[in-house]
Image: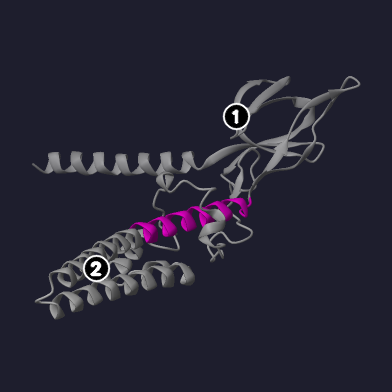
Amino acid sequence: MKRNILLVALLVLISTISLHVNAQTSNMEDVVYLKNGSIIHGIIIEQIPNESLKIKTKDGSVFVYKMVEVIKLTKEETANTSMNAGNAYNSNNYIGNQYSNVVAPSYNQIKNKYNYRMYTANPTDQYNPTISGLCSWFIPGLGQVICGETGRGLGYFGGTLACSLVMSLGAGIASASYYDDGAMIAGSLLTLVGAIGLLTVDIAAIVDATRVAKVKNMYINDMRNKTSLNFELSPYVDQISMQNEIVRPVGMTMRVKF
């Protein structure tokens, strides 16, 4: 029994040591120091004693050096990836109004440039089409107002008041003309026209509010994308032949995305 316990303990110890060694090894890389002052980080994939070596950097580039150019070879812990050749430094730098409010022009100015049917919801949307539609359902025109279209919202609200007035007027005439068939018919028609108009304006206000919100969101998202700037920086190491000599330019490369 004691023998089995000792064997299990020994296996656990060996496994722990092995994992520790593997972890340390995975954090190591080959480093080549050259006489011209360059320091190359990577993995040596081929080495011919006293002649040459090949080293592969983390970006997949392979460089060949003669041993007479090399000062020393070492194994070191992996350096900061932003300083190694081939490891791009990604900086999501956004210049402009990427996450701030973009003032959209009036709906009439942009409605022909954007198809609301192509709208897709975005977490950063400034206006919520559903809330705008619900607001215009409770009070016609309110959804337009919260989207910055005050004049448009007041137009729908005024249309609702006008239809309500016609409906009320017709109901008053119909109720006051109990013994006058002609007036009764006229009052009933006015009431019907007012009711149909009120329903039509209410539905139109709901639909219009959702469209206004969608189109304005599309414009704002478009402007945010246009005013964003993304760039990537990465160290640059190359090897070229000039006049029968090997030249290794070292520098930085930058890629800009608009």
Q: Is residue 245 above or below residue 79?
A: above
The answer to whether residue 141 shows anywhere in this view is: no
Is residue 216 covered in magenta?
yes
The disc label shown at residue 60, or none: 1
Foreground residue, 84 or 170? 170
Q: In the image, what residue occupies the spot 33% across and 75% down?
A: 161
Is residue 2 covered in magenta?
no
Q: Position of residue 78 (x, y in %)?
A: 56, 44
The region drawn magenta spans: 207-229
Q: Position of residue 28 (x, y in %)?
A: 53, 41
Q: Position of residue 201 (x, y in %)?
A: 32, 63
Relative side of 112 to 180, left or right:
right
Query: Looking at numbered disc 2 in the image, what kind of residue is underneath it?
Result: Leu
Circles 2, 1 touching at the beta carbon (< 8 Å) = no
Q: Quadrant of residue 210?
A: bottom left
Q: How is the image coloured?
A: one colour
Residue of label 2: 190
Q: Is residue 220 above or below residue 155?
A: above
Query: Looking at numbered disc 1 in the image, what kind of residue is underneath it?
Result: Gly
Q: In the image, what residue occupies the spot 62% across and 33% down?
A: 57
Question: Considering the numbered disc 2 on the image, is that residue within a helix, a strand or a loop?
Answer: helix
Foreground residue, 60 or 226? 226
Is the residue marked by circle 2 packed among few (<14), some (14-19), or many (20+) residues within 10 Å?
A: many
Q: In 3D space, how far apart are the residues under numbered discs 2 and 1 (Cα atoms)?
A: 81 Å
